[in-house]
Amino acid sequence: MNVSDLREILQYVPRFRERIFVVSIDGAVIGSENFSNILLDLAVLRSLSIQVVLVHGASFQIEQLGRERGIVLSNSDGTGVTDEASLQISIDAAIRLTNKIMEGLSSVDLRAAYLNAIVAHPAGILGGEDYQFTGRVERVDSKALHLLLSEGIVPVLPPLGFDGEGRTYRVNSDVIAAEVAEELKAAKVIFLAPSSAFEQAIRLPREISIFESEELAARHRSDWPQNLVSKLNRGALVCRQGVPRVHILDGNVNEALLTEIFSNEGFGTMIHSDEYQQIRRIYKKDIRNVMTLLRQSVKNEELVRRTRAEILAHIGDYWVLENDRTIVACVALHVYPNEATGEMACLYVSSNYENQGYGRKLMAFIESLARSKGLKRLVALSTQAFNYLRQKGGYTTADPDDLPAERRKKYEASGRHSRILVKNLV
């Protein structure tokens, strides 16, 4: 680890201290070689005063135990019909797994407690079929969970729920994680899925909105692994209910958990509520960060060099795109009111965030801003990104005579011979 890595980690620590993370681990991940590394990651979170609630699945172990006992299961993941035989297998497998998790947490010097904090009732008759011992979450015992968390104890919740008459129900772990996170007003839900959920054909974006998550789940309901579709749906739902961030990670990859939490780039896929990402005006305090962001682009002669004084003199023209409070892209709109023309300038996205649609988002923002100012067209100058502006932004090639008179003088004096592009806004 170098100094910059450490600084990047430390910027998150004050933000997360004493916040609650709900970590949901699929049974297949607990059964993998990487589980011992995940335990160490959880110990790191606790050492930073982050409160952790651990929810675990068990479908992998339930299927394994069913095969050993020669029992045909009606369902293993708590989303279908759970008959009595499947329920007994589920209870046995889940309690064994809970005990294994408790042992693992003790091995990394974490105090933990198994808690029957999920009050459930039968799922009932769905689509004309009785789901028998499949349960739905009726209530989360938040008081008991907060009591354990206040004492530095990690609550461990199996994929089971209990009613007031002592009956047990099989409940899907994704559902439990979402319900617990909402009730505790958690800062994050982190789903650790097995590698099988991330097939080669699947390329999930690094971050997606609530709407995009729901859209992906609906579009790929039949062709993506169901445990991944479930997490996309539950992640979107819990964000709508007030949890700011949901992360979906490959739990078989070492350090995926810490990389996702403590780096700007992340590792897996994050579902975020709208405030995660914003385009805002540049502040004076941002100028240094913007110049650092642009440094390599200037060196590559993609953008013209701008001094601090030049940016400060036109600070009202500059906008930045923030990703989780980190500036990752910028753009400027220079206005020539006498000719009802604006220049889209200084469009740049950090190389760590390329191919995620940020450039198009900024171009759309500038178009909207230009229209709100009554401008009739936009011009742009580029030495290397002209194809991108044509293909993604709808710009067309133009001549120096199409530039505003004031801008044309600067263009001729620069000697850069940039390509000139224009887009009509009418």
Image (cartoon, rainbow, N blue to C red):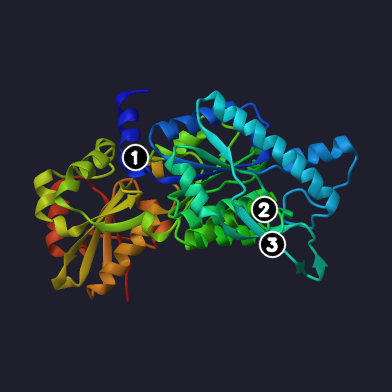
The answer to whether residue 106 is above or below residue 90 is above
Q: Residues within 10 Å of mark 3 (few under 14, many from 20)?
A: many
Q: Which residue is mark 3?
A: 121
Among the 4 quarters of the image, the one containing residue 35: top right
The C terminus - image quarter? bottom left
Q: Earlier in the sequence, mark 2 or mark 3?
A: 3
Residue occupying image coordinates x 67% and y 39%: 27
Q: Amino acid at mark 3?
A: His
Any part of residue 389 in sight: no
How far apart are the alpha carbons under marks 2 and 3?
Answer: 8 Å
Callout 2: SS: strand
> How far is the residue under mark 1 from the one under mark 3?
39 Å
Q: Which residue is mark 1?
A: 12
Could you tell me which residue is drawn at 38 percent across and 54 percent down? 276
Question: Are dots 1 and 3 in contact, CB under 8 Å?
Answer: no
Q: CA distance from mark 1 to mark 2?
A: 34 Å
Residue hosting label 2:
161
Picture coordinates of residue 110, whole percent (x, y): 50, 30
**Amino acid type at image mark 2:** Gly
Q: Secondary structure at mark 3?
A: strand
* Left or right position of 77 against 277: right
Q: Earlier in the sequence, mark 1 or mark 2?
A: 1
Residue at the right extreme of this rendering: 70
Give the x, y percent position of residue 420.
28, 56
Q: Decide: few, some or many residues near mark 1? Use Cα within 10 Å; few <14, some 14-19, many ≥20.
A: some
Above or below, 51 against 396 in this view is: above
Q: Residues within 10 Å of mark 2 (few under 14, many from 20)?
A: many
The amino acid pointed to by label 1 is Tyr
Near-viewer residue (290 or 119): 119
Position of residue 334 measured from the top left corner of the image (x, y, whole percent): 19, 61
- Are dots 1 and 2 in contact, CB under 8 Å? no
